[in-house]
Amino acid sequence: MTDKDKEAIEKSPRSLDQALRPADWKEYVGQSGIKENLRILLTAAKGRNHQPEHVLLYGPPGLGKTTLAHLMTKEIGASMRSTSGPAIERVGDLAAILTNLNAGDVLFIDEIHRLNRTIEEVMYPAMEAGVLDIVIGKGPSARTVQLELPPFTLIAATTRISMLSAPLRSRFSGGTFRLQYYSDDEIAEILKRSAKILKIEIDGESLKEVATRSRATPRTANYLLKRARDFAEVNEERLDLKTVKKALALLEIDEMGLNQTDRDILTVIAEKFKGGPVGLKTIAASLSEEEATIEEVNEPYLMQMGLIERTPRGRAITKKGYDHIGAEIPSAQQKLI
């Protein structure tokens, strides 16, 4: 490796995702209602010289929960300590994190729904009273030691809010906010900024094409933009609409943003099970795919686009779903949809 190559690596950002993350509120596109609520929460806390209350952010992956946590931290001029639910395996792990916080710090816990119930119970007094109760010893000789914690703000993120216990959810006194999917115009605006940061020359029509196939998710949109750029560079082509379409076709992303697994789900329901309804376990077995993957990754977008629907007896494909895969609606199904 030459000195020039080493210098280029040192100057490059640690992560492209970090480079694309908005650095201030003006750069954060969308979620206007949540941003206004958070602005009021933080401004009021600063005005009273109080620590902001704990906040819970939830919604599908890639919508900007972590970015909002960073922006909130920057707004109050604090330091952020980041961890995740799976990383906190024992009460001792949580105790170590909490006791090492400085006054005014923000603790960000991603995937908080994966905390076990024992650790959740330790969180209650820490969030509510600012103390940490630790049990030392076992049996009749066990005793509880109470440690006072410095003032801190917990910002938690989850994609599965239903897996959080009600007592834990109720302790997010600053508010619980659900992030919504983005419009094509919002995604196009995000992509315009990303293209500028990545120094990609691309026209508005091509950006719009990427936006419409991004599943209304900024993370996916930036991923598709980077892959389209790579395709154009490797094939020495100009990054125009034609090249973008070829790059996305290679990735098997269609005009609605569906990938091959999405289309396979629609096809299996339509052709193998005559439109449904059919159970999730049966669909997963037919595709040799995990139930959780279909339920958490594919199904939300298919439902959002109106391609499938949930019924008491299982999943069923809609007329729009039949049209998308070009399948004929069985005569017995025509009366039902």
Image (cartoon, rainbow, N blue to C red):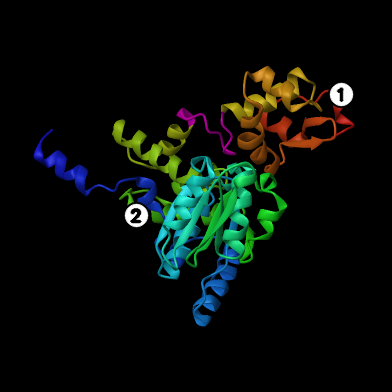
Name the residue nearer the viewer: 294 or 91. Answer: 91
Secondary element at image label 1: helix
Q: Is residue 302 left or right of residue 186?
A: right
Around disc 1, counting alpha carbons within 10 Å, would you say few (fewer than 14), some (14 to 19), or many (20 or more)?
few
Image coordinates of residue 12 in percent, x first then y, are 25, 47
In-front residue for pair 248/42: 42
The tag earlier along the polypeptide, 1 or 2, is 2
Q: Residue furthest bottom?
A: 47
What residue range appears in magenta?
A: 249-259
**x, y percent for residue 55:** 58, 61
Instruction: Characterize the magenta stretch by its predominant secondary structure.
Output: loop
The number of callouts visible is: 2
Q: Considering only vertical position in the picture, is 102 above or below 17?
A: below
In the drawing, does residue 193 fall left or right of residue 303? left
Local packing at callout 2 (Cα closer than 10 Å; few below 14, some 14-19, many 20+) is: few
Res 55 visible: no
Q: Say which mark, if any, is on residue 196.
A: 2
**Residue drawn 43% across and 67% down?**
103
> Which residue is the site of mark 1?
331
Q: Is residue 164 left or right of residue 41?
A: right
Query: Does the magenta run of residues contain 256?
Result: yes
Residue at the location (39% across, 52% down)? 20
Name of the residue lying farthest toward the front: 141
Q: Give the Cα separation between the discs numbered 1 and 2.
A: 52 Å
- Cβ–Cβ under 8 Å for marks 1 and 2: no
Q: Is residue 241 magenta?
A: no
At 52% from the left and 72% from the top, the residue drawn is 42
